[in-house]
Image (cartoon, grey):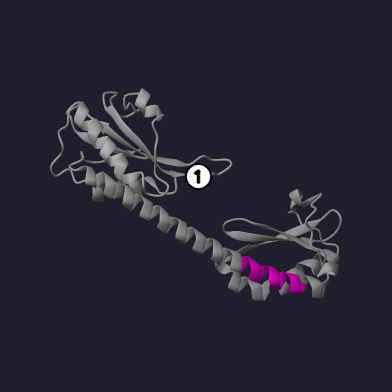
């Protein structure tokens, strides 16, 4: 799920009013569910899920009584992430009081549904929020890629001129620059992306000082042990 629980709750509050709760019998609930599906299925990425586990649990959840009738399940978001399956479903449920309730992800609407159009609006608002999240994520990734390129350009220049081999590791907040000292030793400099403009002008001096200290015979107490056997060293001769 790409949207936090707090954001889901906000979407539910903004779209499910509870002003004039519908009162429906089982047949009316089924008709409204089909109406909802017909209105949202044409939206790209939205799918009905007739095999939802909730269908066979009567709407049961750890913090909800198992008395709600299942009306329909709609898949709103799924991820092809290799390691972590992320999905967001919308469930329409009928309570013993003959009211319709919505579960979005793991959050329930604070009020019953007054009109099926509210649920359609909720689906649209959720998808718009997902699109904004994706756009922001793409923007952040682009900014990070530009920073990585700027750092690497500077490092490659220094490595070529000062003759040292290096390797890099990148995560979401920093680039780790690993400087090769000998066959058995190296050291790492962490360059946070949010400070890279301040760090870059000082990088050459820092590397030179550390190499000079090492060359005097002083040995460091910290090592990047994972770098042993590393195959992605960038050789200064190749720059």
User: How many numbered discs, if any?
Assistant: 1
Question: Magenta stretch mostly in which secondary structure?
Answer: helix
- Hey, which quadrant is residue 148 in on the image? bottom right
Q: Nearer the viewer, residue 129 or 36?
A: 36
Instruction: Say which quadrant the N terminus sits in.
Output: top left
Residue 69, image x and y in percent? 27, 26
Residue drawn where x is 77% and y is 62% of the image: 166
Number of residues whose C-alpha sits closer than 10 Å to that of mark 1, classed few (under 14), some (14–19) or many (20 or more):
few
Residue 73, image x and y in percent? 35, 35
Residue 108 showing in the rendered view? no
Q: Which residues are magenta?
A: 147-158
Residue 61, image x and y in percent? 34, 28
Q: Nearer the viewer, residue 33 or 169?
A: 33
Residue 130, image x and y in percent? 41, 53
Q: Nearer the viewer, residue 224 or 131?
A: 131
Task: Judge whether residue 41 is colored magenta.
Answer: no
Instruction: Say which quadrant the C terminus sits in.
Output: bottom right
Residue drawn where x is 28% and y is 25% of the image: 65
Q: Image height check: is 52 above or below 225?
A: above
Q: Is residue 17 left or right of residue 160?
A: left
Residue drawn where x is 32% and y is 52% of the image: 125
Residue at label 1? 79
Residue 142 showing in the rendered view? yes
Q: Nearer the viewer, residue 180 or 152?
A: 152
């Amino acid at each position: 799920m790409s949207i936090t629980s707090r954001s889901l709750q906000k979407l539910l509050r903004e779209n499910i009013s509870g002003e004039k709760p519908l009162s429906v019998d089982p047949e009316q609930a089924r008709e409204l569910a089909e109406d909802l599906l017909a209105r949202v299925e044409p939206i790209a990425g939205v799918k009905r899920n007739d095999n939802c586990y909730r269908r066979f649990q009567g709407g049961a959840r750890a913090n909800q009584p198992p008395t709600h009738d299942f009306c329909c399940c709609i898949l709103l978001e799924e991820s092809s992430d290799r390691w972590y399956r992320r999905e967001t479903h919308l469930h329409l449920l009928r309570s013993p009081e003959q009211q319709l309730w919505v579960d979005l992800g793991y959050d329930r609407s604070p009020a019953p549904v007054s009109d099926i159009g509210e649920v359609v609006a909720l689906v649209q608002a959720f998808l718009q929020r997902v699109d904004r999240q994706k756009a922001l994520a793409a923007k952040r990734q682009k900014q990070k890629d530009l920073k990585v390129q700027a750092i690497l350009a500077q490092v490659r220049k220094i490595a070529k001129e000062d003759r040292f081999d290096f390797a890099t590791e990148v995560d979401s907040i920093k680039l780790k620059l690993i400087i090769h000292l000998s066959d058995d030793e190296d050291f790492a400099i962490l360059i946070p992306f949010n400070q890279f403009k301040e760090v870059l002008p000082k990088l050459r001096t820092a590397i030179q000082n550390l190499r000079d200290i090492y060359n005097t015979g002083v040995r460091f107490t910290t090592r990047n042990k994972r770098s042993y056997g590393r195959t992605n060293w960038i050789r200064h001769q190749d720059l």
